Amino acid sequence: MPEVTLIPGDGVGPELAAATRLVLDHAAGSIVWDEVVAGEEAYRKFGAAIPPEVVASVRRTKSALKGPMGNPGAGYLSPNVDLRAQLGLWCNLRTATYFEGARSPFPGTSLVVIRDVTEDIGRGVQQMVGDDAGIAIKFITRASSERVSRFAFTYAREHKYTHVTIPHQAPSLRTTDALFLSTAMAAAKDFPELSVDDEAMDGLSTHLTMRPQSYQVLLCPNSYGGILCGLCAGLVGGVGLMPGVNLDGQGIAVFEAGHGSAPKYRGLNKMNPVGMILSGAMLLEHIGQPEASARVKAAVSKVIAKHESVTYDLGGTATTTEMAEAIVAAL
């Protein structure tokens, strides 16, 4: 039986993790869960948001399902960034897919955002200069740009996508964005079956909101990818529908929803579990259970389309647990 690390996380994380485990156990029925504590509770108990046991578990199982963890801003590092760094996870992938019944006017939308998470301005290399000025350093390397580009092109090929778009601001950021773009375009020559183009972030943002069905895979540096994840989630009905995964390219994968821990909703049992459940579906495919993965996706689609047992963000009144139970019934 496959063993998977389960990290419930902070805020609404434990509720979503329980809902997702309910669905996956019904769909697969053969997962051995190694539940470990990380985030706020771990920091209170052990003085570390990411205890060594968490990293050891993921390295052993090679796969994890993680609930959202809060970013305290002070006291300790972001546990999400810390976990990625300790495991060497350099690629973040999130999908935004239209479901009939969701609050979206864009049927047919299927977007994938792939970004490097080791570089760019999003790494937080910054400092104050006196009291009245701040500096944040944006850095891009050819090696990391080529690594994430080849991953994105390979992913597109393997998943039958034909079009990859590279967002950038290369005309003004000539030493960083231009390096990322030129490196990606050079790598694209080895994937002649793909249509690869580039677009400035401002124009891309406009065109995505007008005709998102024209795009498929977005290959991005860190910060643009984070922004576009939010935009793409909104296009298909909300961040509660967005699954994702962080990868090291060597077999370790940590699956998580595309949203945060939402601490004000902790314990209310009202958050949409679909993002984490679909992340679980991605996990099933990763551990060699593609049929179970397809069944979970189909059950989610059926429940959203039926629109009887959905959470408030989808226009319903169901609780997190009730929606998960409806998905189990649809299985």
Image (tube, rainbow, N blue to C red):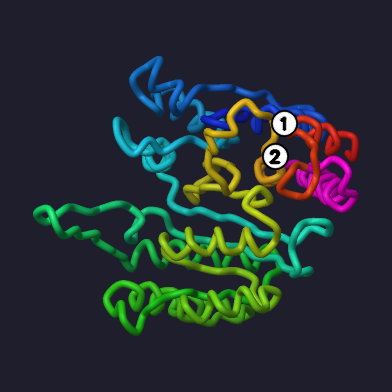
* Residue at 48% in and 74% down: 167
Which residue position is annotated with label 2? 273
Task: Check the picture and name the quadrant holding the N terminus.
Answer: top right
Q: Say whether residue 304 is magenta.
A: yes
Q: Position of residue 45 (x, y in %)?
A: 40, 15
Front-lying residue, 319 or 47 = 319
Q: Which residues are magenta?
A: 288-310
* Residue at 31% in and 72% down: 176
Residues marked 2 and 1 touching at CB (< 8 Å): yes
Which of the labelled discs sits on residue 308, or is there none?
none
Question: Disc 2 residue type?
Answer: Pro
> From the viewer's perspective, is 137 left or right of 13?
left
> From the viewer's perspective, is 309 left or right of 111?
right
Q: Position of residue 300 (x, y in %)?
A: 81, 46
Who comes first in sequence, dot 2 or dot 1?
A: 1
Question: Disc 1 residue type?
Answer: Ala
Which residue position is annotated with label 1? 19
Toward the bottom, the furthest residue is 171
Q: Secondary structure at mark 2?
A: loop
Q: Secondary structure at mark 1?
A: helix
